[in-house]
Image: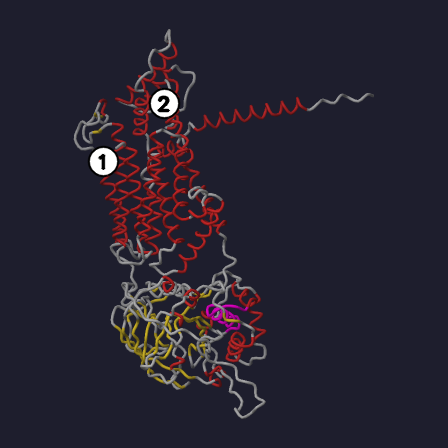
């Protein structure tokens, strides 16, 4: 196996090693095998093209076309010309799949199902990274820079996966990269011979032996030491740097933070897609509970509260977490004796197929009895799993309060504390003015915040002409709420987000709660909660009662009694029919089963993450063409610094190719010296130029002898009485020896300049400038000759 072939194989292994970091993101690993096969074919095409040999740009283009053909056959065969040739329909299909995959990545909880769109993103990404690694490490023989795309590929998986086997994927990626480095070192040594680490050659230089001679190679040992040292530093740095909170040897966990019982819970998006959850054909059971509450129809099971509004979406803030206290602290804003409360005990059994980080509980909970590793977030009064703890199969008991304020108590509630107002009434300037204008219009005539809240709820649920529709797109954008207010179609995400945002514009503290509606009562006295019971609702703050639930979504859940106006006496025939306050929409009973369909994962029901909350309508998001254009532009910008390196490598290969001749080799020698700071001098003879390069470049031993041989060959080629009968042998080897000697004697800055900004590029730029000037002069001459001259008019 040749050196470049070995490098290509190691590049494939390194790419697959980095790609293994994305294995935890998808529930099936067949995509990795598919990527490995396609990547092997793409790399094999590169190996064959370099053996032909083809030009560098042609080799890269051929590999890229091969990758496109492979993706076409696998993912868009029906749209391809003849089943394998990509055309406009294939590009359109790819654009649609990329858009779907991007949307799925943002909505699915890990591990996500291996849909066609997600597989295209994974396999296509691996092929792209593999192509870059092959070009950099094999074509341009730069294994070290090839670590950058490998790092990018590894970082995507490591950043999104939250499993406890991060060290395994790091080890796999690091091993692949080390193999690539060692293969490059072996390839270089096989071309230059072996070098003694301790001995010296002529004039004190390192002794060079022919391949196959001598003991173990010192540069290989040095490369191993450097690689091990770098990886060791990467592992040990998080332990010794106090500013780094995490790492393989000290993983970041919710249970480990500053101080006793410290730590933070990072901001999460707990509602990936209620829409898909509500539209799925089966209502899969996620939990079952029994409760002592007198009104179980009001027992919403709350997962988490979204309190940060950025103008386009609601999210949970970063919060400190602590050990679970017993009992839990008094809820914020709930004053003992100010409103009526009733204690309820609820026993919950989560399904084996339902696993998420947050523990669904009635609000506000007073105490929780649950096995496992759980932590407490005081602001939202939620329990979050620690060290991978989830709700899968959990059995727990919650003692909670059923808070029953009256309309009069909420209407007379005093002003909230300044801290609550400051944090929970923030509205970004990006929110369209129509949101606040509509809120003021709807609540006109209200005497207090409570009446404003009820008017908002009734406008959404009854009098505003809104229609519950789960087919409406759920997305993001600064104009999302404004579009929903105009179109008046949506589901619970749209209604809860919009009402909470409008309440904030009125100065009412508001947030959005995510969880489940009470569920369906069973004949045995239990209540079954299914995937279709997933819900979002607004919570508004009233001093004395605390965070209070409202229900603006039509035909979903139940509107609280404290928001319902008393109806007329039933014997009054002239009285209008009371507006519906309970859900009349039929809903299929939850089905049991521990298996988890792909649709349920979009609610976070089977993954480690809870569903993500998105604001309505994402029509104003970036188009796939724009995203593709931005990505292509970014890749072009990143590739610009490598253009001089690619050009110089190509020119060197052409000049040193077999049969190129003595003049080409001599020009390559002078250009190489120029790259390392020795500009050419046309006034000198070849022998004088050789002496100058030897002295200025501090060449010794074999490198100095090679310069002399090249000068002699040039003199014979120029001044011999007759043409040479046979081509001169060893020209390329001599130029390579001189280049190696110049590089060894130069400092690191000079080496970088020679690699990335070769000075000999000026020769080509000058030639291009001269050619352009000549072409422009010829064009001007032709234009002038084609235009007839006008004679001077007669006087």
Q: Which residues are magenta?
A: 488-507
**Residue beneath the point at 50% across and 27% down:** 768
* Closer to the camera in the image, 389 or 762: 389
Q: Which residue is mark 1?
A: 220
Q: Is residue 620 above or below residue 406?
A: above
Question: Which residue is disc 2 drawn over?
Answer: 669
Q: Residue furthest right?
A: 795
Q: Residue 479 at what x, y percent from top left?
A: 53, 62
With respect to residue 237, does 443 lie above or below?
A: below
Q: Which residue extends farthest bottom?
A: 571
Instruction: Decide: few, some or many residues near mark 1? Use Cα within 10 Å; few <14, some 14-19, many ≥20.
Output: some
Residue 496 in magenta? yes
Q: Quadrant of residue 219?
A: top left
Quarter of the picture containing the C terminus is: top right
Name, please, the residue furthest toward the top: 721
Q: Nearer the viewer, residue 737 or 639?
A: 639
Whole-percent x and y of residue 29?
Answer: 30, 53
């Amino acid at each position: 196996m040749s050196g470049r072939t070995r490098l290509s194989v190691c590049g494939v292994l390194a790419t697959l090693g980095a790609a293994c970091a994305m294995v935890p993101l998808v529930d099936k690993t067949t995509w990795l095998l598919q990527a490995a096969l396609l990547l092997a074919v793409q790399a094999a095409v590169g190996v064959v093209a370099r053996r032909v040999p083809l030009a560098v740009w042609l080799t890269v283009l051929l590999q890229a076309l091969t990758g496109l053909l492979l993706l076409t056959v696998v993912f868009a065969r029906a749209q391809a010309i003849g089943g394998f040739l990509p055309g406009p329909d294939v590009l359109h299909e790819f654009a649609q799949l990329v858009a779907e995959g991007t949307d799925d990545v943002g909505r699915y909880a890990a591990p996500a199902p291996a849909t066609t769109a997600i597989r295209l993103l994974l396999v296509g990404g691996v092929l792209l990274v593999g192509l870059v690694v092959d070009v950099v490490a094999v074509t341009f023989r730069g294994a070290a820079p090839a670590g950058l795309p490998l790092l990018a590929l590894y970082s995507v998986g490591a950043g999104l996966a939250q499993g406890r086997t991060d060290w395994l994927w790091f080890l796999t990626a690091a091993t692949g990269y080390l193999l690539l480095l060692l293969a490059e070192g072996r390839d270089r040594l096989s071309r230059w011979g072996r070098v003694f680490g301790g001995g010296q050659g002529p004039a004190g230089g390192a002794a060079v032996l022919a391949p196959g001679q001598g003991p173990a190679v010192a540069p290989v040992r040095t490369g191993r030491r450097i690689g091990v040292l770098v990886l060791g530093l990467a592992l040990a740095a998080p332990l010794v740097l106090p500013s780094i909170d995490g790492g393989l040897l000290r993983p970041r966990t919710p249970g480990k933070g500053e101080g006793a019982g410290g730590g933070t819970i990072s901001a999460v998006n707990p509602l990936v897609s209620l829409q898909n959850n509500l539209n799925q054909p089966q209502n899969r059971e996620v939990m079952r509970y029994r409760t002592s509450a007198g009104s179980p129809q009001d027992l919403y099971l709350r997962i988490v509260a979204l309190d940060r509004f950025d103008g386009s979406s609601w999210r949970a803030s970063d919060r400190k977490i602590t050990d679970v206290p017993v009992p839990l602290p008094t809820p914020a804003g709930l004053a003992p004796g100010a409103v009526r409360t009733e204690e309820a005990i609820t026993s919950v059994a989560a399904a084996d197929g339902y696993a998420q980080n947050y523990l669904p509980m009635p609000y506000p909970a007073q105490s929780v009895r649950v096995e496992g590793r759980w932590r407490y977030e005081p602001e939202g009064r939620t329990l979050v799993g620690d060290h991978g703890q989830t709700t899968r199969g959990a059995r727990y008991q919650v003692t909670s309060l059923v808070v029953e304020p009256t309309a009069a108590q909420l209407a007379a509630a005093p002003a909230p504390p300044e801290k609550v107002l400051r944090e929970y009434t923030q509205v970004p300037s990006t929110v369209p003015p129509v949101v606040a204008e509509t809120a003021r219009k709807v609540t006109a005539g209200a005497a207090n915040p409570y009446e404003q809240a009820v008017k908002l709820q009734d406008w959404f649920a009854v009098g505003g002409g809104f229609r519950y529709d789960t087919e409406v797109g759920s997305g993001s954008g600064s104009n999302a709420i404004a579009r929903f207010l105009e179109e008046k179609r949506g589901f619970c995400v749209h209604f809860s987000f919009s009402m909470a945002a409008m309440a904030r514009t009125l100065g009412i503290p508001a947030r959005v709660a995510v969880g489940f509606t009470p569920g369906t009562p069973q004949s045995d006295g239990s209540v079954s909660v299914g995937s279709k019971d997933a819900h979002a609702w607004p919570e508004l703050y009233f001093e004395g009662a605390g965070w209070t639930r409202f229900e603006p979504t039509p035909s979903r859940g139940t509107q609280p009694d404290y928001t319902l106006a008393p109806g007329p006496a039933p014997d009054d025939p002239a009285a209008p029919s009371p507006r519906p306050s309970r859900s009349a929409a039929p809903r299929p009973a939850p089905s049991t089963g521990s298996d988890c369909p792909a649709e349920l994962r979009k609610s976070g029901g089977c993954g480690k993450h809870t569903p993500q909350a998105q604001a309505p309508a994402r029509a104003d998001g970036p188009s796939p063409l724009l995203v593709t254009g931005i990505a292509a532009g970014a890749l072009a910008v990143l590739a610009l610094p490598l253009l001089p390196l690619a050009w110089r490598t190509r020119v060197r290969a052409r000049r040193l190719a077999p049969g190129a001749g003595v003049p080409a080799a001599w020009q390559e020698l002078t250009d190489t010296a120029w790259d390392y700071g020795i500009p050419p001098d046309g006034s000198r003879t070849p022998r004088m130029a050789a002496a100058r390069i030897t002295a200025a470049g501090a060449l010794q031993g074999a490198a100095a002898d090679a310069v002399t041989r090249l000068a002699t060959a040039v003199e014979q080629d120029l001044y011999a009485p007759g043409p040479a009968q046979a081509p001169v042998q060893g020209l390329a080897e001599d130029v390579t020896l001189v280049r190696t000697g110049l590089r060894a004697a130069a400092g690191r800055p000079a080496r970088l300049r020679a690699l990335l900004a070769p000075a000999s590029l000026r020769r080509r730029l000058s030639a291009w400038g001269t050619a352009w000037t000549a072409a422009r002069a010829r064009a001007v001459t032709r234009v002038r000759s084609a235009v007839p001259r006008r004679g001077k008019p007669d006087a």
